[in-house]
Image (cartoon, grey):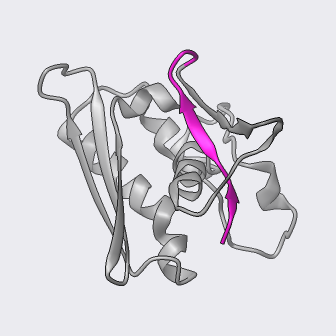
C-alpha cells in the first residue's frame, strides 16, 4: 500500500502534502491515514451544534448518498470548549470513532488511544494513538491537539 505522504510543517504549524524532487512523496505507513482521519472535519449531527451553526463535513462523503461512511473526526467541536475531564473523554471518543474504519476495513487489529491534559501547560491537550497491526504497531503523538484543528 502506498499513500501520498502528509507531513507536519513546523514553520507554518500545519500538515501539508509532501513534495520530493518536484513529485508527490509517497509513504507506506499509516501516518497519512491517521492524520486525515483525525484532522478532516466529520459532519456534525444537528444536535451537536447550535441551530444556525455550520455542521461542516468533508464534501467527499456526499459522493455516494447511500453510504454511511464518514471521513474525519469531530475534534473541532471541542476546540473552543473549556478543558475538563469530560472534554478529555470526548476527545478520546472522537479519536476512536474517527479511526474505527481501520479496524472495520482490516487495516488494524486494535486502536489504543490516550488523551490527557498536558501537565506543564493546562491549556494544552495531548494525544497518543497506537495502531496495532498483528505483531506490529505504530504510535503517533500529537502534542497540543487543538493546534491542529
User: What residue do we see at 66% from left, 34% from top?
Assistant: 16
Q: Position of residue 121 (x, y in %)?
A: 19, 19
Q: Residue furthest top?
A: 11
Q: Position of residue 92 (x, y in %)?
A: 32, 52
Direction from residue 82 to residue 50 in the image, left or right: right
- Check the image and report above or below for 7 versus 27: above
Q: Say which quarter of the image contains residue 85.
A: top left
User: What residue do we see at 69% from left, 47% from top?
Assistant: 57
Comparing 104 with 62, the one in front is: 104
For the question of whether residue 61 can be seen, the reply is yes
Q: Which residues are magenta?
A: 1-12
Q: Say which quarter of the image contains residue 130.
A: bottom left
User: What residue do we see at 58% from left, 58% from top?
Assistant: 33
Q: Say which quarter of the image contains residue 54.
A: top right
Direction from residue 15 to residue 58 in the image, left or right: right
Q: Residue furthest left?
A: 119
- Check the image and report above or below for 97 versus 128: below
Comparing 143 with 44, the one in front is: 143
Amino acid at each position: 500500500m502506498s499513500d501520498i505522504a502528509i507531513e507536519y510543517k513546523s514553520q507554518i504549524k500545519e500538515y501539508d502534502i509532501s513534495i520530493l524532487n518536484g513529485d508527490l512523496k509517497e509513504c507506506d505507513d499509516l501516518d497519512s491515514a491517521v492524520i486525515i482521519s483525525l484532522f478532516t472535519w466529520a459532519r456534525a449531527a444537528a444536535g451537536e451544534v447550535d441551530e444556525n451553526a455550520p455542521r461542516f463535513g468533508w464534501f467527499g462523503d456526499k459522493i455516494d448518498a447511500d453510504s454511511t461512511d464518514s471521513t474525519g473526526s469531530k475534534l473541532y467541536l471541542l476546540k473552543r470548549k473549556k478543558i475538563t475531564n469530560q472534554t478529555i473523554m470526548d476527545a478520546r471518543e472522537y479519536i476512536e470513532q474517527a479511526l474505527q474504519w481501520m479496524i472495520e476495513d482490516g487495516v488494524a487489529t486494535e486502536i489504543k488511544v490516550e488523551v490527557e491534559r498536558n501537565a506543564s501547560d493546562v491549556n494544552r491537550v495531548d494525544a497518543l494513538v497506537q495502531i496495532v497491526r498483528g505483531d506490529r504497531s505504530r504510535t503517533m503523538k500529537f502534542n497540543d491537539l487543538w493546534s491542529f484543528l
